Amino acid sequence: MIVFPNAKINIGLNIVGKRADGYHDLETIFYPIGIKDALEVVEANELSFQSTGLDIPGDPDRNICLKAYRMLSLDFKIPPVKIHLHKNIPIGAGIGGGSADGSFLIKLLNEKFNLGLSGERMETYASALGADCAFFIKNQPVFASGRGDRFEEIELDLSKYFIALVMPDLHISTFEAFGGVRPRKPGVSLKELVKENPVLWKDSVINDFEQGIISQHPEIGYLKHLLYESGAIYASMSGSGSSVYGIFKAPLKLPELEIGNRVFYGV
């Protein structure tokens, strides 16, 4: 059985406060996009995991797919399986590739082995894997708050637009990203701002991570500039980076962005 976990982008991101537990409260819009991995599960004599495509750093035995399987196996009698992940979503891009893989495995196991899990129950399991994982259960646009783990469904449809995403050869740690921000409460909620035409987002829909990260990594700012120069009506870093996306009214090619970068067209 094969599924195709998709990525997401953050449209705007406000860091609104520091919590007593050390985490930050944020507000952002999660929007699913069409960059996808491929995830296959077949019954086997013993549990195993293998990956192809992009190299996944770290210990394969700690991959989020295995974590998801082992978590469900504590509550359900699931036979051993062979998990094959073909990785295409860029790693460290701020677009939720790992979170999608773990959440899609929960959905896959629920369907394949008739576990009878409701959407709400699957979201509970997914939340145990990571703050944004539960988003990929329903996989619909949401306003996210808290640690990025509280969701409110919103009406947002960008299907008539064309999204290009650029992934530079650059890794930005979570520590580095948060080191450059100061919490603030926005004057107008993102829920209201994204109701406007995307043409109007440029000066109002802000990612609080950008200023600090661009000061340390000016190439991010340059990529954003090139997207606007190429005709984007809105461009932004996604999450804490390092990917940058542009929203366009029509398809185009961006050859000047491809040197040293991975570019995904038409997502």
Image (cartoon, rainbow, N blue to C red):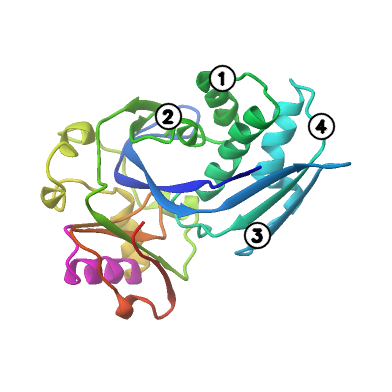
Q: Which mark is residue 121?
A: 1
Contact? badges 4 and 2 (CB < 8 Å): no
Q: CA distance from mark 4 to mark 2?
A: 41 Å
Reading the chain from its start, which is encountered first: label 3 or label 2? 2
Report whether 138 appears left or right of 253: right
Reading the chain from its start, which is encountered first: label 1 or label 3? 3
1 vs 4, front mark: 4
1 vs 3, front mark: 1
Start and end of the magenta stretch? 219-233
2 vs 1, front mark: 1
Q: Which mark is residue 19?
A: 2
Q: Position of residue 73 (x, y in %)?
A: 76, 27
Few, some or many residues within 10 Å of mark 3 (<14, 14–19, 20+): few
Reading the chain from its start, which is encountered first: label 4 or label 2? 2
Q: In this orientation, which residue lies closer to the viewer: 168 or 19?
A: 168
Identify the residue position indicated by label 3 in the image. Answer: 57
